[in-house]
Image (cartoon, rainbow, N blue to C red):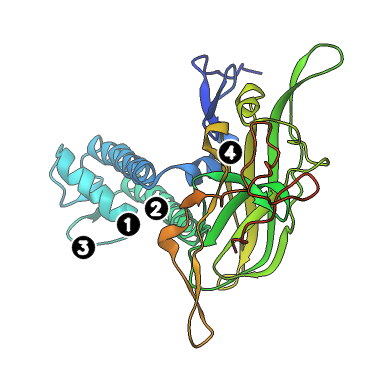
Amino acid sequence: MPRRRHNRQGISVRFGSTEFLKINTARYDWRDLYHNLLTFTWPQFATLILAVYLLINLFFGTLYFVAPGSVAEMQPYSFGEAFFFSVETLATVGYGHMYPASWYGHVIATLEIMVGMFGMAVITGLIFIRFARPTARIVFSKTAVVAQFDGKPTLMVRVANLRHHPMMEVRFQMVATRAIITKEGEEVVIFPQLKLIFDKLALFPVAITLRHPIDENSPLYGLRPDEFAEHYVRVHASVACVDSVISASVYLNQTYESSQIEWNRRFVEIYTEMPDGAFAVDYSKIHDTEPVQPGTELGSDGMVQVTDNLVSSGAAGSTPATR
């Protein structure tokens, strides 16, 4: 078997702000052509379609050009007329002034018509898939926060639904990555699951805050703020749900580096109850945070400081909950 060519310059893959460089691996595989075409941007996709279209017409136009008399009423050795006859034939559009006039011309025109029919079907399908592919109109907060919630240091992330209809069968996940030293002295990266106070919703209409208590059962327990960077701690939040309009699954994730985690801050309130009982939700404040109330700050060790006479078992009183 012939050896596959590999890209030794490396293929860049990003995971949050971390870049991985894949080396000694093929950039493209013709067996995965369909997936590759769907991953192209719209400008890349349009450029590729235009290039293939021109190449096909140049190829068949050349076949007509080298056989004078194969197409009636076409000027001999006129590449322009041969090219545009190919364009008309590929699109199965006949204007009547030029037509195949020999067996050679009929055979080439038949082949080109078949290419045009199959090509149009493929392009139509690809364009439909690209337009019909569901997108997650969901946004995560730009930063995560760590503050006291219900008497415990809690990691919080806000997520909002930007569509004007509820998402259904919603599942949230939060995973951390951190480096540890094994008993053999080897540094490895682990991916512990961060247990959320809730991780499922039947309906997701507007915005909500995901919360992970940093207690004795948390993989982040005991880490000081400065140790998040030392241990390469990152938090990965994700949401998977079903769009109730198109009945299709959508998915989105967000990665927070240690520098994107704010301590002793909470998300500002975005809900306001109206006189008629409805709730107004201010989407302009989705990413906004504010300092916690005095007396509920977290110390440098990540534990709650007890000040202003707010005393409890190892923690201060809770701050108002952010929905």
Residue beneath the point at 37% across and 41% down:
44
Residue 278 position in % (x across, y down): 52, 82
Asked if the residue at tag 4 contacts the one at tag 3, i.e. Cβ–Cβ closer than 8 Å, the answer is no
Q: Which mark is on residue 116? A: 2
First-in-chain label (2 vs 1): 1
Amino acid marked by disc 1: Ala
Amino acid marked by disc 2: Gly
First-in-chain label (4 vs 2): 4
Asked if the residue at tag 4 contacts the one at tag 1, i.e. Cβ–Cβ closer than 8 Å, the answer is no
Give the distance between the C-alpha atoms of the residues marked 2 and 1, in whole angstroms: 6 Å
Amino acid marked by disc 4: Asp
According to the picture, the residue beneath numbered tag 3 turns out to be 95
First-in-chain label (3 vs 4): 4
Q: Nearer the viewer, residue 153 or 105?
A: 153
According to the picture, the residue beneath numbered tag 4 turns out to be 32
Q: Residue furthest top?
A: 185
According to the picture, the residue beneath numbered tag 1 turns out to be 91
